[in-house]
Image (cartoon, helix red, strand yellow):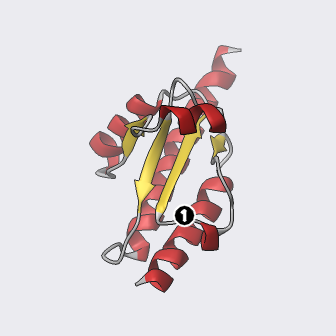
Amino acid sequence: MRAHERRLTERLLAGLRRIPGVTVPGTPDPERRVGVVAFQVAGWDPTALAAELDERFGVLARAGLHCAPLAHRTLGCFPRGTVRFSVGWATAADEVEAALEAVRWLAAREEAALRAST
């Protein structure tokens, strides 16, 4: 189960880091992580992003400070917090890909809106 979780975490980390405008705090080493990946997307409030992921794509995520405001201060994410995806033994690789595609689409939409306004 840990090997499956590590593979999905690695896929999620790598995929998020390739999306322009996405910031992933913490270590990039999947061996030093559990199946929880927090991130921010430039131009998006984390709560609004999580809602859009759910409403538009059916991708579930959590947003905010995740009961750890001091950790977010340390990571530089306070007071906005982050969006958080979690993977585990029941998560399929295609679900991770769907989540990445949704983030990619929303990040590109926001980037285009920012370019249009300048």
**Where is 96 relative to 49, above or below?**
below
Looking at the figure, which quarter contains the N terminus? Answer: bottom left
- What count of labels does the image hold? 1
| Residue at the front extreme, as displayed | 70
Q: In the displayed structure, does residue 56 sit left or right of residue 35?
A: left
Query: Depth check: 101 or 43 in front?
Result: 43
x then y, percent, for residue 110: 56, 31
Of 82 and 71, which appears nearest the observer?
A: 71
Amino acid found under the numbered disc labelled 1: Leu
Secondary element at image label 1 = helix
Residue 7, how many percent across, how many down?
54, 78
From the viewer's side, name the closer residue of 118 and 58: 58
Q: Is residue 69 left or right of residue 74?
A: left
Identify the residue position indicated by label 1 in the image: 12
Q: Residue at x 46, y 81 (%)?
A: 2
Closer to the camera, 40 or 109? 40
The percent coordinates of residue 25 (x first, y second) are 64, 46
Q: Residue furthest right?
A: 118
**Image quadrant of residue 10?**
bottom right
Which quarter of the picture shows residue 56? top left
Q: Residue at x 60, y 61 (%)?
A: 13
Mark 1 surroundings within 10 Å by alpha-carbon count, few (fewer than 14), some (14 through 19), many (20 or more): many
What residue lies at 63% left-to-right and 48% top-to-bottom?
Answer: 24
52 relative position to 80: left or right: left
Of all residues shown, which one is farthest toward the top? 118
Residue 55, given in percent of the width and then of the height, sits at 28, 40
Q: Is residue 24 above or below residue 100?
A: above
Q: Residue at x 39, y 31 (%)?
A: 47
Residue 47 vs 90, above or below: the answer is above
**The C terminus lies in quadrant:** top right
